Structures are given as structure tokens and as C-alpha cells.
Amino acid sequence: MLFTVHKAKSQLSKLIDAALAGEEVVIAKGTKPVVKLVAIPQSRFKLGVLEGKVGNPPDFLEPLSTEELDAWEGK
């Protein structure tokens, strides 16, 4: 898709939707292409997805018991 700057200004929402749909959107000054509108990939990472499914992780800030501390110290 090739649009002039003037036409792109009046149809920006449509051009953004086209870019998000994977179409190549090029904006030209006169007849010379100068920029390409490209969608930014969105992250699908979500915190807490496995919450409650993998059990309780250890609390690494909790002090060790005497037996665990002795085992770490080789006693």
C-alpha cells in the first residue's frame, strides 16, 4: 500500500490497522517513498501464568534450619 503524506494524515487509523494486520504500508512525499509503517511485535509474556500449578517455591530469604545449615557447612 502506498499513500501520500496528505492521504496518510486523513487515514492514519486505517493505515495502523493495516500494518497491524501484516500489510506493508509505505508513505511517500509526492511520488518518492520515504517511510514504512511497521507493527511493533507485542510480548505475550504474562506473570503468574503457572501460579498454583507448580507448587510452592522455596522462600530463599527464609533462614535455614539448624540441620540444613549444618549440612551446608559440612558438619
Image: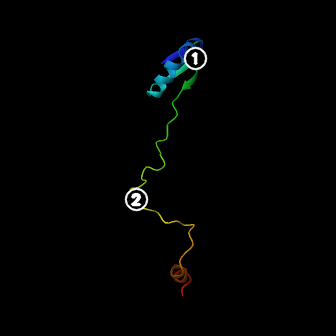
Q: Secondary structure at mark 2?
A: loop
Location of residue 14 with respect to 68 vertically, above or below? above
> Which is nearer the eye, 56 or 3?
56
Q: Is residue 24 visible?
A: no
> Which is nearer the eye, 50 or 25?
50
The mark that comes first in sequence, 2 or 1, is 1
> Which is nearer the eye, 33 or 20?
20
Location of residue 16 with respect to 49 vertically, above or below? above
Report the residue marked by disc 2: 54
Report the residue marked by disc 1: 28
35 relative to 43 in the view: left or right = right
The image quarter in which residue 27 lies: top right
| Mark 2 closeness class: few <14, some 14–19, many ≥20 residues within 10 Å | few
Kind of residue sitting beneath label 1: Ala
Q: Residue at x 51, y 82 (%)?
A: 67
Q: Is residue 64 visible?
A: yes
